[in-house]
Amino acid sequence: MIARILLSLLVMQQLPAFAQTCSCEKDSSLILLDCTPLVFDNQAKLYWSYNCDSSWLTFKHAEITKIIFSLGDGLQGYTGRLGFSYATEYHTTFWIRNNVISGCCEPPEYYLFNKKNGSEIKNVGRLIFYSEDKKFPFVIGITNSNYDTSSVKFKGYKTISIVNVDKNKIYKIPLPPKLAKETLKADIYYPELLFSEPILKNGVVALSYSVTGKKEEKIRIDLNKYLKN
C-alpha cells in the first residue's frame, strides 16, 4: 500500500503545541489509539496524541518536550502500524521501531534515542534481534543491512554485528557460509526474513534461520562474553 514514509509528515506548526489531545468525534475508529504515557525509569515520558487531522508521538523529560514523529494526511489511523512505535528501553537510551510499510513484507528499521533529552542518536537499520532485558543491552543485525545501503545486497552479506548499546561497542562474527551464499541471490532483498523469532535464554541468543529447501539451523551467540569486553 505504502512503500515508504517520510518522518514528520506534518510541519510542527500544524500540531497543537505539545498538547495531549486524544479525540476525534468524526472518526470513531481512532479511539483505539492508546494515549497512556509510557514512563521510563528516569521519569521521561513517551506518549501519543491525536485529533481528526493527525497523530503525533511526544517525548517529555523535565523541561524538554518535543514531538519526535507525526502522521497526517489521513494516515493517522495507521498509527502504530506505519512509522514509529516504541520498542524497548535501556539504561540511557530507548529504541523506536519504524515500520516502513503497513503490512507485509519489508522489515522495520530501528532508531536509537537519548532517554534524557529525546534526541535521535542514530538509525541502525534493520535488526534480527534486540534485547528487552536491560541486563543485556544488545542488538544484533546483519552488517550493512540498511535501507540507505541497498546496493550492499548485490555484493552479499558476510558478517553479523553485535552491538553493546550501553558501551557503544560493535563486535562482528562471520555469517555461516550457506547463509552468506544465500544472500547473494537476486531475490533475497531482506536477509532478515530468513530468520525466525529469536530466543534469549540466560544471556544466550538463538537465531534460527533456513535457506531454500534446507533444514532450519541455529546461530548461538553468548552475550555474557560481550558484557565483559
Image: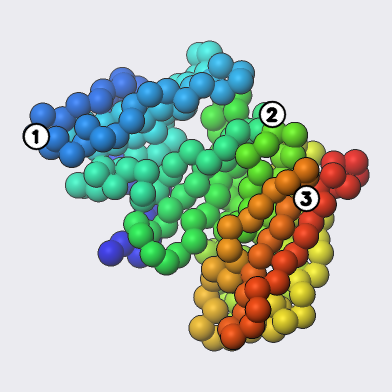
Name which quarter of the figure residue 133 lies in.
Answer: top right
Do the CB atoms of the residues marked 1 and 3 lie less than 8 Å apart?
A: no
Residue in view at x 13 percent, y 37 percent: 27
User: Amino acid type of disc 3?
Assistant: Val
Amino acid type at circle 1 is: Lys
Q: In what element is the residue under mark 1?
A: loop
Question: Which of pointers 1 and 3 lies earlier in the amino acid sequence?
Answer: 1
Disc 3: which residue = 204
Q: Is residue 141 at all visible to an observer of this figure? A: yes
Give me the residue at 61% from left, 18% from top. Answer: 42
Residue carrying label 1: 26
Q: Are marks 1 and 2 in contact (CB under 8 Å)?
A: no
Q: Earlier in the sequence, mark 2 or mark 3?
A: 2
Identify residue type, mark 2: His
Look at the image and tell me in which quarter the N terminus lies. bottom left
Image point (88%, 47%), residue name: 225
Distance of label 2 from label 3 (alpha carbons): 20 Å
Q: Residue furthest toward the front? A: 215
Residue 170 seen from this side: no
Disc 2 designates what residue? 91
Q: Position of residue 157 (x, y in %)?
A: 69, 74
Residue nearest the viewer, comparing 124 with 135: 135
Disc number for residue 94: none
Image location (x, y in percent) of residue 228? 90, 41
What separation in Å lies between label 1 and label 2 (alpha carbons)? 41 Å
Quarter-of-image position of residue 47: top left
Q: Secondary structure at mark 3?
A: strand
Position of residue 89 measured from the top left corner of the image (x, y, whole percent): 60, 33
